[in-house]
C-alpha cells in the first residue's frame, strides 16, 4: 500500500539520519519497490547487518543494519544486504550466499551508489568491482577507509580486529569487560575465544579493539 506524503517525508528524514544525503531517495525507492522492513538496530558485535527473505512468519523482505555506523559504512553494509535480496529474488536458495551471483549483484549496486562515497573509498571500490571473484583483501581495506569517517575516529589510537594477527588477546572497546583471543578470520568476521567462559564467538572484523599484552 502506498504511503501518504507525510509518512514518506518522515521515513526519508529517518533514513537521512543514517545515510549520505543523496543516497536517501534511491534507497527509499528500493525499499518501497521490494516491500522491505528495514530495522535499524543497536550495535551488534557479531554482525553489522543481515537479510531475511519472506517466510510464513514474516511474509516480507527484512533487512537490519547497525545504527551506530557512520553514513558511508551504513550504506556499504546496506548495499551488501540489498544484494542478498536481489540474489534471492533471482535465484532463490539455489546459489551460495556469497557466491558469484551475489557478488555480481553487489558489484552492480556499489557502482550504482558509488557517487555517494568519499573519493578515497570510491577509488578503491572501482578496483574492487573490476572483476569477480571480489577481492576479500580489498573489501577489508574499503571497510578500514570507511571507518576513518567515524565521528570519533582517532588514527593514533584506533585499532580494528581486522588489523590483528591470530592469537592476539584483546578487549572490544565497546565492551571492555570482555576478553578475547583472535583465532581465525572468516570473511568479514573473526572466530574469537572468550577467555572467561571458554566459548567461541563470531566478532565483526571492524570492531574497535584494545590489545592486551600482559596475558
Image: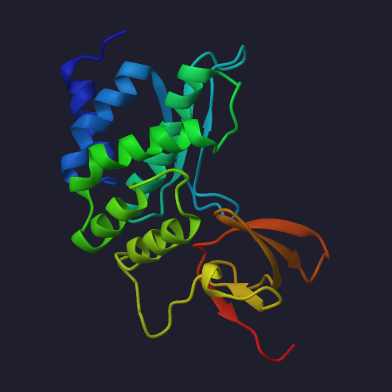
**Is residue 89 at least partly visible in the picture?**
yes
Q: Is residue 51 above or below residue 111?
A: above
Q: Is residue 86 above or below residue 81?
A: above
Residue 67, x across and y down, in percent: 41, 48
Residue drawn at 45 percent across, 38 percent down: 103
Residue furthest bottom in the image:
214
Residue drawn at 62 percent across, 76 percent down: 165
Horizontal relation, residue 149 to residue 180: left or right: left
Residue sitting nearer the eye, 107 or 200: 107
Horizontal relation, residue 115 to residue 89: left or right: left
Residue 111, x across and y down, in percent: 26, 41
Q: Quadrant of residue 172?
A: bottom right
Residue drawn at 26 percent across, 28 percent down: 28
Residue sitting nearer the eye, 14 or 190: 190
Residue drawn at 33 percent across, 61 percent down: 146
Residue 177, x across and y down, in percent: 66, 72
Residue 97, x across and y down, in percent: 57, 34
Quadrant the C terminus occupies? bottom right
Q: Is residue 90 above or below residue 157?
A: above
Q: Is residue 182 above or below residue 188?
A: below
Quadrant the N terminus occupies? top left
Amino acid at each position: 500500500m502506498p504511503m501518504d506524503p507525510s509518512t514518506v517525508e518522515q521515513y526519508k528524514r529517518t533514513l537521512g539520519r543514517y545515510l549520505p544525503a543523496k543516497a536517501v531517495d534511491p534507497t527509499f525507492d528500493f525499499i518501497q519497490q521490494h516491500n522491505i522492513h528495514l530495522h535499524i538496530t543497536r550495535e551488534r558485535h557479531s554482525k553489522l547487518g543481515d537479510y531475511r527473505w519472506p517466510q510464513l512468519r514474516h511474509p516480507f523482505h527484512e533487512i537490519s543494519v547497525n545504527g551506530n555506523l557512520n553514513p558511508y559504512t551504513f550504506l556499504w553494509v546496506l548495499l551488501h544486504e540489498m544484494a542478498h535480496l536481489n540474489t534471492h529474488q533471482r535465484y532463490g536458495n539455489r546459489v551460495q550466499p556469497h557466491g558469484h551471483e551475489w557478488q555480481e549483484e553487489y558489484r552492480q549496486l556499489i557502482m550504482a551508489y558509488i557517487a555517494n562515497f568519499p573519493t578515497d573509498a570510491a577509488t578503491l571500490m572501482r578496483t574492487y568491482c573490476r572483476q569477480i571473484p571480489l577481492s576479500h583483501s580489498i573489501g577489508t581495506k574499503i571497510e578500514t577507509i570507511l571507518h576513518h569517517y567515524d565521528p570519533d575516529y582517532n588514527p593514533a589510537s584506533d585499532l580494528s580486529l581486522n588489523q590483528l594477527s591470530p592469537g592476539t588477546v584483546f578487549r572490544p572497546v565497546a565492551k571492555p569487560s570482555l576478553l578475547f583471543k583472535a583465532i581465525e578470520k572468516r570473511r568479514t568476521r573473526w572466530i574469537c575465544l572468550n577467555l572467561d567462559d571458554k566459548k567461541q564467538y563470531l566478532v565483526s572484523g571492524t570492531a574497535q579493539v584494545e590489545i592486551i599484552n600482559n596475558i
